[in-house]
Image: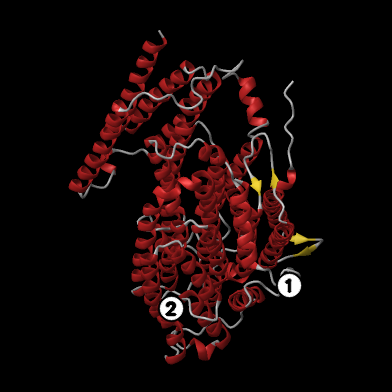
Amino acid sequence: MSLWLFYAFGAVAVIGALGMVLNVRNAVASALCLVATMVALGGVHVLLEAYFVGALQVLVYAGAIVVLFVFVVMLLNLRRDGFPPARARLGRVTAAAVVGAALAGLVGLALTLPETAVPGATAALPEGFGGYRRVGAALFTDYLLAFEATSLLLLSAMVGAVVLAKRRGGDA
Amino acid sequence: MIPAPVLELRAVLPLGVLALGAIAVLVLDLVMLDRSRLFGRSVTRAFVGTLLSLTSAVFLIVVLVLGVQNLVHGSTAVFNVANPLVQLDPLANFGVLLVAGGTLLVCLMSVAYLAELDINHGEYYALLLLSASGMVLLVSATDLLSLFLGLEVTAIPAYVLAGFDRGRRRGNEAALKYFLLGSFASAILLYGMALLYGATGATTLEAIRQAEVASSPLALAGMGLVLVGFAFKVSSVPFHQWVPDVYEGAPASVGGFFATTVKAAAFVALLRLLAVALGEGASWVAPMLAVLAALSMIVGNTMALIQQNPKRLLGYAAIGHAGYLLLGFVAATPEAYAAVLFYLTAYLFMTLGAFAVLVALANRGHDLERIGDLAGLAKKRPALAGALTLFAISLAGIPPTAGFLAKFQLFAAVVGAGHVGLVILAVGTSVLSAFYYLRLPVLMVMREPEGPPPRLHLASGEWLVVGVCALAVVTLGLLPNGLGVDSPSLLPPALDWSRDAITALLASR
């Protein structure tokens, strides 16, 4: 059952990702394809018993971040003819081919490699794994410093945004 | 009931002091901006800038004192023994000294410069301190998680600082380029870290080495991607394209900050990563690092020969120096690691000094844009010209300066590890570098002055920074160990400390 669900979510995620990249005509549709991918990834998290992370994935990525994308896209009102004409087409095709070949090689390598368990992956899940209680406890005990450092990161991003965007006296 | 973790706050004291300093500067700026007066007296913008710079300096000096004390005692503090994200060991303390010292010099030399460029805003100092707190996290990180957070807290304010002069197109271009390429490099680094976690099931550097999976393809790919990310951060060829553009576009003081402080922190973190996470299994990265080092030395020093913009020249020179530093990682012996730390110290003072001279020469709202404008400086401003000559001599690695001793130590250690070919290349490119470094004094002395005269008034902060750097370059070259271990407060025994830091690091793993 969960294997089939994984295939279903995986397929939605891949199709959504392809739709986002290939849909060059309409940026809003691209962003909505991204929503589909994010929701499907949230489903994969739930299948891995990471319920809290799954919920966050939907709330933060599918909800907040992509909505922000859509806002920006609509504000900028981009149309296809608004982009500068694509130059150096050959170079781009070559680059895409090289990256694609490398990716295909990696996938092929992964398929041929013998199945080895990731260290720690075979251990039984602890009680309450993936729940908000456990995530919260980890966040405020073991990873307290990382949590606080992230707030420093947000502070610098905020100060930076103000510095770069605020209207100053005398500035145009 | 969740048991409360046992924390040792001493391990994050420097980080906390710097973060607190950033917030204090922001609040102080806001209060004074709002009222334009202090204790009932009206204040000018220049006064506010000076006050904020001095406030930042106080916090940075506190951190410096903390670092010196910890180094003298050789103490190690772990924040949370149950899950050690950071560890303030001698190596971290050495890094803290480099970071706090570099940031302090940048703060002091910026006061008049920001006013000259008409970008005298308080957020500048707050961003410097935030970036410095990220670097303190970076140099003390013993876990992939804190390592990545440290890199990002360092980088985000740095992106903004690169474009701090919003009115200038080059600055905007530099900030955008730095931001896009930097984010890209961070993503690659993070991907590599995810693969390393997948291969080992651990995020602490110590546990990654103990997992002994260096030969598994997953770990190889992960470590390779992490190295690519770091190669970007330390500006090594072929991930160097952003360096000259960013150094040229950013204000000169910020360029100096990137070239010295940010780079030193990234190198210290790389040292800990390679020494702890790879340990004896590091042999397979040596050829990769050797290629990076050789390319950086050749490309950096060759391209610097043909530059006309002084900031751009220092940018390419910085790439060359990154190549020399990477040699130490190829050798990977304790002596080589210690030599890397000493080189970073010497490099900090000589490069920051050169940038400080450029800051002092900024005129009428513009940086010095052409090397030709240095012509005749020896007549107009003999002291500045003398200082720049000293820095150039040191950067080229000519005795009796710090640059010579640092290069000598490093090259000797690398030869000791058996990499003679690389050292021959390094010496060859050093000779090449002497051409473009020594062109500066020749221009300043031999040519007649042309172009606009330099600024009439130099701020005391600029004199102070140029003086301190010049003094440090000479004393580190002649007395690398100060006046002995007994009087570290006067002249720090930098060479001994670098050796102690590496010994402690290798002994603790």
* Residue B36 appears anywhere in the view: yes
Q: Which residue is mark 2?
A: B437
> For the residue carrying disc 2, how many other residues have a C-alpha within 10 Å: few (<14), some (14-19), or many (20+)?
many
User: Residue B337 — which label?
Assistant: none
Q: Judge depth for marks 1 and 2 and give the one in front.
A: 1
> For the residue carrying disc 1, how many other residues have a C-alpha within 10 Å: few (<14), some (14-19), or many (20+)?
few
Question: Which residue is found at the position 39% from the left and 60% from the top?
Answer: B293
Residue B305 drawn at (x, y percent)? 35, 74
The subunit carrying tag 2 is B
Question: Quarter-wise, where is residue B120 in the image?
Answer: bottom right
Please, what is the three-letter code of the amino acid marked with disc 1? Leu
Quadrant location of the C terminus of chain B in the rendered image: top right
Direction right: furthest residue: B39
Direction left: furthest residue: A90
Question: Quarter-wise, where is residue A125 in the image?
Answer: top right
The subunit carrying tag 1 is B
In this view, the residue in front, B330 or B78, is: B330
SS assignment at label 2: helix
Residue B38 drawn at (x, y percent)? 78, 61
In this view, the residue in front, A170 or B363, is: B363
Residue B442 drawn at (x, y percent)? 43, 87
Do the residues bearing badges 1 and 2 touch, measured as CB atoms within 8 Å? no
B373 vs A166, left or right, is left
B393 vs B44, left or right, is left
Residue B463 drawn at (x, y percent)? 63, 78
Question: Quarter-wise, where is residue A76 in the image?
Answer: top left
Q: Which residue is mark 1?
A: B490
